[in-house]
Amino acid sequence: VQLVESGGGLVQAGGSLRLSCAASGTEFSINAMGWYRQAPGKQRELVARITSGGSTNYAHSVKGRFTISRDNAKNTVSLEMTSLKPEDTAVYYCEADWRRTGLSADFRSWGQGTQVTVSS
C-alpha cells in the first residue's frame, strides 16, 4: 500500500491547514489510519489516529484544534488543523495499518511526509 500526502505549507499562527492522504494498492483493507509529525531534533510523535469504525484519539497538544476524518470507500484520511501554533511546525506523515485480502499478517505503511510551517 502506498500513501501520498498533500496539503502542507506555510501559514501564520492562528491559521488553518488541511492535510490529505490517499492510499493505493491492490487487494487490501485498512484498519487504522493516522497522522504523525516530526519536528527537527525531536522524535516522531502521534498527532491523531482513526480506526475503520471511526474511533479517534488525539495527542493532548492538538485536542480541540485538529480533527481527523477518513473516507473508507476512498481509502483517504484527512487532518483539519485550526488555531495553528509555531510549535505545530513539523513534517507530517500519514500512516496506515493494513492487511492483504485473505491474509492475517499486518503491515504498516508511511507516506513521504509533508512540511507544515507555522510562523509567529
Image: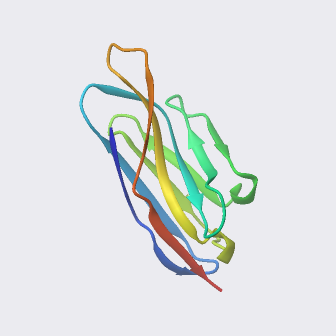
In the rendered view, would you say 112 is above or below 55? below
Is 72 placed left or right of 63 in the picture?
left
In the rendered view, would you say 18 is above or below 23? below
In the rendered view, would you say 33 is above or below 81? above
Residue 90 in percent (x, y) is at 57, 68
Q: Residue furthest right?
A: 60
Residue 12 in percent (x, y) is at 58, 83
Q: Residue at x 44, y 60 (%)?
A: 113
Count the numbered circles shown: 0
User: Residue 115 or 6: which is nearer the viewer?
Assistant: 115
Q: Residue furthest bottom?
A: 120
User: Residue 95 or 70: which is nearer the viewer?
Assistant: 95
Q: Residue at x 36, y 39 (%)?
A: 75
Picture quadrant where residue 42 is located: bottom right
Residue 80 in percent (x, y) is at 53, 59
Picture quadrant where residue 88 is located: bottom right
Image quadrant for the C terminus? bottom right
Q: Residue furthest front?
A: 41
Q: Residue at x 42, y 15 (%)?
A: 104
Image quadrant for the N terminus? top left
Residue 73 in percent (x, y) is at 34, 34
Q: Residue at x 65, y 68 (%)?
A: 41
In the rendered view, would you say 40 is above or below 25? below
Is 13 placed left or right of 101 in the picture?
right
Coloring scheme used: rainbow
